[in-house]
Amino acid sequence: MEIFIVFSTGIVGLVLAFAVYMYLFIFNVRPKRKITECDDKDCVRCKKYTEIKEKAVVLYRNYIDDCDSDLLRIQSSVTDINKTRHNRKQCPNVFFMESLKSQPWPSETNSDIEQDVNTLEKNISMIQSDFVRIMDSSEDHWLINNTPNGFWEVFHLVNQGNVVEKNTQLVPKTYDLIKNLKSAMLNTVFGNVAFSVVYPGTTISDHYGPTNIRLRCHLGLQTSPFCSIVVDGQKKSWRNGKGILFDDSYLHGVEYTHDVKDENKYRAVLMMDMWHPDITKEEQKILSYMFPP
Ligand SMILES: *[C@@H]1O[C@H](CO)[C@@H](O)[C@H](O)[C@H]1NC(C)=O
Ligand SMILES: *[C@@H]1O[C@H](CO)[C@@H](O)[C@H](O)[C@H]1NC(C)=O
């Protein structure tokens, strides 16, 4: 009897171990690496909205001694900086700039942005090979963002205006390319460049970005028909080697429906922020001053 119990426990144990192994084999497609949780108290995504606004108002007043008419819409946006917006579709939680032509999926931009997206697309194989290398990197270069389920990991080259040198060193060619783009928003708290990876079964809850002064570009590196992004109710998917632009001050979220048969294993994009096409160089200057990294 005892022998039988020992024997059957052993069998049950083996079966369980095998089931766990198969489960991990099928579902856990994430590379094994240590991931650092975002614990930055100054993170725009995480909080500090009021502080950033108050500082921006002070910096604006420092700046405008020789205000010209170009800056009028910034002036009135600063005056209204605390105003609650009642537009549920577009609701940036730090800074709303008035009189910008806003669309969730901009149908036309300007020649700088078009050229930049084109440059990214043309250099796709170089960016891909940089990406493949960092996916294999086992050190803590990645941050994990909170999601209700699944995994969303980012490898920042620029994080809220700060260059992450330990990361750019690993992808110098991609970083060089981005630094030289005309519309890249690099020097403000709103500017980010990152490789962004989402795994099957992940939901990125609907949220608003911090401002409407930027457009977000996603360059598809590895895409999946099971993963899509919805901006203001309009759904799109990525394509390998293609850039898409959206205004992330509109409500948006990502869904990667689970499918174990998905050969793609994960969705990867190079994400970067670009100056909104309606913002003049002069306005870029004052906005960079008002919202430093
Ligand atoms: C915005 O609100 C803060 C208090 O939260 C206040 O100190 C500040 O003066 C207000 N700024 C403007 C421009 O109304
Ligand atoms: C990017 O692509 C352009 C156009 O094809 C090319 O001239 C340039 O050398 C490429 N840059 C890099 C860093 O590969």
Image (cartoon, rainbow, N blue to C red):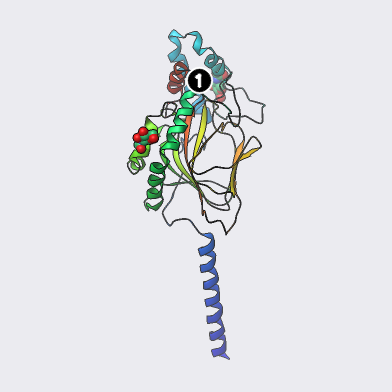
Quarter of the image holding residue 19?
Answer: bottom right
247 over 83 or under it: above or below? below
Pointer 1 local density, CA inside 10 Å: few below 14, some 14–19, many at least 20 = some
Quarter of the image holding residue 158?
Answer: top left
15 over 190 or under it: above or below? below
Name the image quarter holding the N terminus. bottom right
Whereabouts is ligand 2, in terms of quadrant? top left
Q: Residue at x 53, y 77 (%)?
A: 13
Q: Is mark 1 within 8 Å of ligand 1?
A: no
219 over 279 or under it: above or below? below
Residue 101 placement (x, y as % from top left)? 59, 22
- Between 271 and 110, which is closer to the camera in this rendering? 110
Q: Secondary structure at mark 1?
A: loop
Residue 263 is left or right of residue 40, and the answer is right
Type of residue at label 1? Ile
Outermost residue to the bottom = 1
Is residue 258 in view from this perspective? yes
Residue designated by label 1: 279
Q: Residue at x 43, y 19 (%)?
A: 285
- Between 188 and 54, which is closer to the camera in this rendering? 188
